[in-house]
Every structure is written in C-alpha cells, then in structure tokens.
Amino acid sequence: MESIASNLNRIREQIGTLSVKAGREPSDVRLIAVSKTKPARLVREAFDAGQIEFGESYVQEFLEKRDDPLLQGLPLQWHFIGHLQSNKIRSIAGKVALVHGIDRLSTAAELSRRSMQQNLHTEFLLEVNTSGEQTKYGISPDVLLSEAEKIFKLPNIALRGLMTIASPDTDLARKEFRELRNLLEALKKNAPDPTLLTELSMGMSQDFESAIEEGATIIRIGTAIFGWR
C-alpha cells in the first residue's frame, strides 16, 4: 500500500495538471484531506507530508481528534463537511475554518445566533442537492436564491459559496458540478457583497478531475489519501 505522503504528492500533481489544462492556476484549488473515521496518527502523517486542511463529518469524533495530544500545537485548519444539525452547532462554533454543510435557513440562523453569543465571525457554505436524490441533504436548486436572500441578512456569519455531493455516475456528476457553478454565478447577482462568494466545494476521490474542470475551488479527498474506510 502506498504511503499517505506519496498519495498526497500524486493528487497534488494531478491538481496541477488538471488546473493548467482547464486554464486555471493550481493554487486556485484547495485540497481538503477528509480524515473522518481516521485516527489522529494518520492526520499527523498527512500533516508531516505538508497537508494543512482536514475535513471531518462527525462532531464528537472531530472534537476528540482536535484535542488529541498528537495534534496539539499544529497549525491545522479544520473543515466541517458533514451534515450539521442545529443542536450540534454550539460544539463546533469557533473551532473550524469553514462549515460546508449548512442546508437550510434554520441551521444558518442557529449558526448566526451562536456566533453572536461567542462574538465570532463564522464562514460557511450552503449545501445544494444538485442530484435531486432524496437520500442526500441540501437545499433544492429551485429555492436556493430565495433562501439565500434571507440568509444574507443574518449577522456574524458570512456565506462564502456552495457545496454539493454529486451523483456516482460520472457524466451526471459533471452536469451537477456545472449546475453548481451556474448557481453560484446567479447567487452573486443577488448578493450584498458578491466578492465574498468565491468557493465551490465539489469533487471527491472518484470525481475530482471533472470538478476541477468545472470550476471547483475546494476538493474533498479521503479514500485516495487515506485508503478505504
């Protein structure tokens, strides 16, 4: 089995090649190493190989990992990429660089409330269900603009862009990535400050190539770095 360091190097090379091919700068695409279900020692191994940003999906696991002695004092940037329930927001407020999984107005409102209580400024993405699958979370594309209009007014939080989990079918995934990019452009037209809307979090181990070609600024890679869960 290849090492985490060699896996990271390979993916970084792919990001560079794909970005240039798409007429983009490699630095425009951020790699989030999805470390959910993986122990702190593997996060440390990835950090030692130059990886700074990590994605977690389960609140309790994230909190335990964040406090692990192996990771203390390291300049890690944590992203919460899983579905986030309102009652869990207080546990992660102020502890993550970016929240990816806000999928409704009520959750955004709770994120705002907790941020106000703790005098925080919290950045987040809206998750959009581009595939239409009932098993997936996310705001429907049809109501995104109207919901975002209300979310823009909430204090102490800043919407930075959109996130999606695409269909397993690669052809469908590409169409969904393109749709998310178009939705972000539409959102910018209604935003109080469109310059804040810079992020498209889309693409995972099996489909990040097409995501980069369709404009992803954040890709979330787990299996291709850490192996199967």
Image (cartoon, helix red, strand yellow):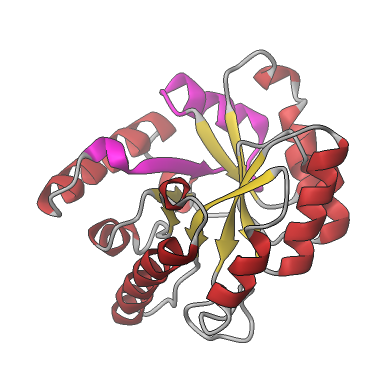
- Front-most of 17 and 163? 163
Q: Which residues are magenta?
A: 26-51
Q: Position of residue 23 (x, y in %)?
A: 12, 50
- Name the residue at 60% across, 67% down: 148
**Quadrant in the picture for residue 42:** top right
* Residue 49 among those drawn in magenta: yes
Left or right, 112 with respect to 179, comes to right
**Quadrant in the picture for residue 65:** top right
- Name the residue at 44% across, 50% down: 221
Which residue ends up furthest to the front in the rendered image?
Answer: 192
- Placement of 135 over or under 21, stated as above or below: below
- Front-most of 154 and 160? 154
Image quarter where the C terminus lies is bottom right
Q: Position of residue 21 (x, y in %)?
A: 11, 52
Left or right, 141 with respect to 87, comes to left
Left or right, 98 with respect to 171, comes to right
Counting the numbered discs, the total is: 0
Q: Position of residue 182 (x, y in %)?
A: 35, 71
Whether residue 197 can be seen here? yes
Q: Position of residue 116 (x, y in %)?
A: 82, 40
- Front-most of 93 and 80? 93
- Name the residue at 66% across, 21% down: 71
